[in-house]
Image (cartoon, rainbow, N blue to C red):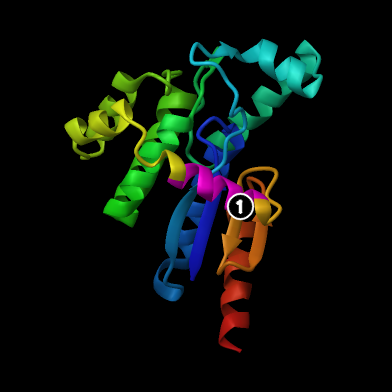
Amino acid sequence: MKIDFVSDVACPWCAVGLNSLERALEKIGSDIPVELHFQPFELNPQMAPEGEDAAEHITRKYGLTPQQLAANRAGIRQRGADVGFDFGDRTRIWNTFDAHRLLQWAGELGAKQQRDLKMALLQAYHGEARNLSDHAVLADIAASVGLDREEAQRILAGDRYADAVRDAERHFQGLGIQAVPSVIVNDRHLIQGGQPPEVFEQALRQLAEQAQS
């Protein structure tokens, strides 16, 4: 079973959704062999390098009151805790394009390398409030999961994988993906949003049965 997890590092629901999906895959175990690929999506492609205050950005973008914003954050924090992801206090939003370039590179190295980097980037951004538009930060994160720091620095210093990221973004937007996380199974079936583990598990088992029938 091929799973494309379309997401942005800046998306808190993507952190919830990925941890939830992993819980479901743990329950499924070897019953369904899975190839998991991470695909790029940018919530804020025009975000400036210096980033923006998170509360101001979210309030303006979604029209939330401070009370609604606080309630939403509390809800996301609880959903994250339910699946083992700890949200920290993040006060700024950063551009994530270069993080996607590194994920594209990691995907060429292997599924495990890409998965480990994705998890580390989500933890750094949402758990530790690190600036993922900072090349030094990105190189440190890459090295922390066993990737070559010097190669990461060379990639970040140039424009390698930029076209690949933009092509992938256009491809999935062309399929109608407008919100993340979006989980696409076998290039045909869409599971939208940060669903609970049991929802992912049930859906994947049903799709596997359909594919065998």
| Residue 4 in sight | yes
Q: Position of residue 60 (x, y in %)?
A: 76, 16
Which residue bears the numbered disc 1? 172
- Seen as rendered, the residue at the extreme bottom is 213
| Residue 26 in sight | no
Which portion, as a residue range, is magenta?
164-173
Q: Position of residue 196 (x, y in %)?
A: 62, 50
In the image, residue 159 above or below residue 54: below
> What is the magenta segment's predominant secondary structure?
helix
Q: Position of residue 74 (x, y in %)?
A: 66, 24
In the image, residue 102 above or below residue 23: above
- Residue at 51% from the left image edge and 24% from the top image edge: 95
| 2 lies left or right of 137 | right
Q: Position of residue 67 (x, y in %)?
A: 78, 14
- Residue at 65% from the left image edge and 58% from the top image edge: 199
Which image quarter is the C terminus in? bottom right
- Residue at 49% from the left image edge and 71% from the top image edge: 1
Give the amino acid at mark 1: Phe
Is-magenta flag for residue 168? yes
Q: Nearer the viewer, residue 30 or 193?
A: 193
Q: Nearer the viewer, residue 126 or 134?
A: 134
Is-magenta flag for residue 152? no
In the image, residue 138 above or below residue 36: above
Q: Quadrant of residue 205?
A: bottom right
